[in-house]
Amino acid sequence: MEKRGRAAVVVLGDIGRSPRMQYHALSLAKQANLEVDIVANGGSEPHLALKEHPSIHFYFMMPVQLQAISKISGAVALILKAALQFVLLVWFLCFKIPRPDVFIVQNPPSVPTLAAVKLASCVRRSKFIIDWHNFGYTLLALSLSRNHIIVRCYFWFEKYFGQMSDGSLCVTKAMQHELAQNWGIKATVLYDQPPEFFRPASLQEKHDLFCRLADEICNPKGIKDCISVESSSPFTYSSGDNILLNSNRPALIVSSTSWTPDEDFGILLEAAVLYDRRVSAALNEDDSINDEKLWTDMISGDQCIYPRLLFIITGKGPERKYYEEKIKRLKLRRVAFRTMWLSAEDYPLLLGSADLGVSLHTSSSGLDLPMKVVDMFGCGLPVCAASYSCIKELVKVEKNGLLFSSSSELADEFLMLFKGFPEGCDTLKLLTDGALATGSSARWASEWEGNAVPLINQVMSSNR
């Protein structure tokens, strides 16, 4: 038999939190029929499809932690960390894995990843392709500034080694133009598209999911609100052999976040507070009414023209605990928050069970698109997304979603979309239909076949 080719997928980060690189690995194995070695940090579990595929092999590196040195000198810790990561990457890429025909590396992070992969490609006579998700120097500039010496050095490093790659993929036309005009790099646009497992959930799947999440939704530690007083799932119930939706269920809104500075979660909190206050004012509610009595009336009585809202926020990141403490201090009557981390199998089911998605991503460079919105469209979930320069490449206003620039604007969108929920929301239904059409129009496999395969074949053939 003809010897199969081999590819190495490189992520200096948690592979379980790098969905695009997971999809690359699956496509390389299934569509390109290659053996695939994933070199990445451990942490979150990758999708089951990767772990079960016989042609995909994992090589996990230990994350470099220098917390003690960071307390003494942040700059020294950064330099030392980069040096250790470089050595670790080179060891794995040059000695631990079989020789690949091509390396495919995620950027950012750029330092020291691009240099390590370039060195490994020279040593092993392999090619390497960069998949540009964003620019590393713009992410660093969020905590420093564009003119900081470290940011300028990072930019030089990223550009220099970026130009040394054998091929490039990127996520938007705007990024493609930036790379061509200002970096001298020719890149192929590979839009994020949802894989097949992102789809609307069936009623049975919704019920099973809500049963699995019942404790986290209805019995959260240290929280008492309009959802925690429910004795069972507020969304579905079983009647004999049938699964039915509760007529006075809350509207379910999902937002996925990395809890980092390029996503201002405070906007969503402020919008939730404004929604709560504006509904109370519209209904002329008496502030002296006991909250628990009000919640009991909401659950057992007639559905109000404006529903309760349950926000489920998924993801891991540095600012999560800060915002969880902030949420606990909010005094909300008809809005509740839950933060959780879901498995790679349950996350698509949650999106497929929700009523609306919210994206707070604004992009440090203004040139990338939020993959979470792509996944939401795959599940037929309409989106309210933070507005920035190239977001309209993905979100078509009043067709599959809405854009907002402030918390007040987002609160107004909640009021408009959910008035009359669940049966009387014509605008929400229109956007849901648009999201379904967007999600079904293109999938990852076809996008990858049309754009990534020609580049990978070209690069690999030049190495033979």
Image (cartoon, rainbow, N blue to C red):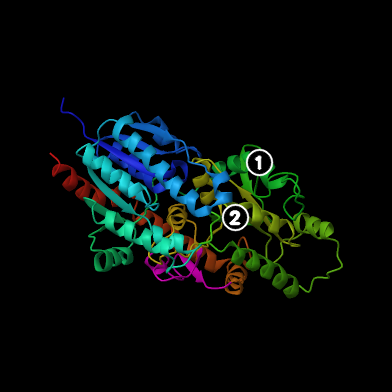
Q: Is residue 229 above or below residue 332?
A: above
Going by the image, does 317 lie left or right of 289?
left
Residue appearing at x 23%, y 63% in the figure: 184
Which residue is nearer to you in this view: 156 or 271?
156
Q: Is residue 198 visible?
A: no
Task: Kindly indicate the quadrant of the structure image that contains residue 278.
Answer: bottom right
The magenta segment: 384-406
Mark 2 belongs to which amino acid? Glu
Identify residue for label 1: 238
**Residue 81 locus on image (x, y percent):** 45, 45
What is the crowding at mark 2: few (fewer than 14 residues within 10 Å), some, or many (at least 20)? few
Query: Looking at the rendering, which quadrant does residue 98 occupy?
Result: top left
Nearest to the observer: residue 230 or residue 144? 144
Q: Residue at x 60, y 71 (%)?
A: 407
Provide residue 238's location: percent of width, then percent of height.
65, 41
* CA gap, disc 2 and disc 1: 38 Å
Looking at the image, residue 129 sits to the left or right of residue 75; the answer is: left
Residue 396 in magenta?
A: yes
Q: Nearer the viewer, residue 50 or 143?
A: 143
In the picture, measured across the screen, residue 103 lies left or right of residue 214, that is: left
Residue type beneath disc 1:
Ser
Residue 268 lies, in percent from the top left, at 60, 64
**Residue picked out by circle 2:** 319
